[in-house]
Image: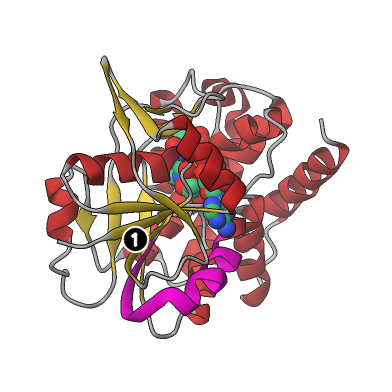
Amino acid sequence: MAHWHVLGAGSLGGLWACRLAQAKLPVTLLLRDSARVASYTRGGGLTLIDGAHQQHWPLPAETLTAPEPIAHLLLACKAYDALPAAQALAPRLVPGAVVLLLQNGLGSQQAVAQALPHARCIAVSSTEGAWRSAQGAITRAGAGQNWLGDAAAPPAWLADLRQAHIPFEWTAAIEMRLWRKLAINCAINPLTVLLGCANGELAQHRDAVDGLCQELSTLLQACNQPDAAAGLNETVWQVIASTASNYSSMLQDVRAGRRTEVDYLLGYALNQAHAHSLHLPALEALAKRLAARLAAGV
Ligand code: NAD
Ligand code: KPL
């Protein structure tokens, strides 16, 4: 049984932390500073709402600079916070520590792995959904899956995830999973921000979506990700149909005045295109329009 440290007591971090605690595994939350630890402690813990079920979890919390060594870490912050968080925790990690990286997109995982050469960094691609209310309660929003893995054999601590009823599949093809999700997000999310619409309304902009999918498939092929490219267009339309009334995470971030993860999605895709000397006009134009919109703050 591992002792899990969870950095980022936000939506997904809170969801994972409560489920690990529910399985009677030791869990400690890592919060930014002592003011946050004090305010969290006054509040008495995390609350998880899962369907009709609501439960309170008074999990212990500490700052990143607490002295206890860390052997199992779940890094559950946004992609742009991952590297500084990992660097701050590096002195606490035991050699061979396991670090699960829950970040969406690509780029942050490689940066963290480089910064933590003595840890086993394992990327996770998640289609689970969770959100945190202004009062701090975490709501699990529907079912989903987590793919995680690396080239080595499945580790013994996966039993903890099983015991915590965290849905997961161990896969050596985690890079393909991350690329596939990145491509889906690039085809859907920026357009929903520019159009200010729910995912389903993209059906009225079929040519734009299809054009992006075509360029994303070209990019995936160039990046040696043929499996991520296979049937991308059809999958994007399936996702649009199955999430028709949802607002994309990027549009929700923009509307809430939060920073987006665009640098790890469209930004990463265009950097890779540049590295492969690919000219992808639709993606480039999309990135320019999105950057202008985000800079204007509308
Ligand atoms: P979130 O903003 O709800 O939570 C992130 C938390 O990390 C925040 O509480 C923030 O304060 C904390 N944090 C950041 N830096 C920190 C630091 N140095 N020390 C301590 N805490 C720190 O984000 P989220 O929605 O849980 O998303 C996390 C990642 O999971 C993102 O990359 C997101 O794209 C991905 N994801 C989220 C969902 C979802 O439904 N929420 C689904 C799939 C993937
Ligand atoms: O993952 C998504 C997101 O909103 O970030 C989907 C559902 C694929 C697109 O909206």
Give the percent coordinates (x, y) of residue 119: 37, 79
Image spot of residue 268 (x, y percent):
61, 62
Horizontal side of residue 37 vs 181, given as left or right: right
Task: Tell me, yes or no, if residue 272 can be seen here.
Answer: yes
The picture places residue 181, in percent across and down from the top left corner, at: 44, 50
- The image position of residue 29, as x and y in percent, is 41, 51
Q: Which residue is mark 1?
A: 227
The magenta segment is: 82-100
At x 36%, y 58%, the residue is 5
Which image quadrant is residue 270 in?
A: bottom right
Left or right of 226, for residue 24: left
- In this view, the residue in front, 150 or 47, is 47
Q: Look at the numbered disc 1 and say if its residue's Cβ is closer than 8 Å to ligand 2.
A: no
Q: Is residue 96 magenta?
A: yes
| Magenta residue check for 65 | no
Q: Is residue 194 above or below residue 93?
A: above
Q: Quick one: which residue is furthest to the top in this view?
A: 52
> Considering only vertical position in the picture, is 285 above or below 98?
above
Vertical arrangement, residue 119 with respect to residue 105, above or below? below
Q: Give the color scheme: rainbow, by chain, secondary structure or one colour.
A: secondary structure
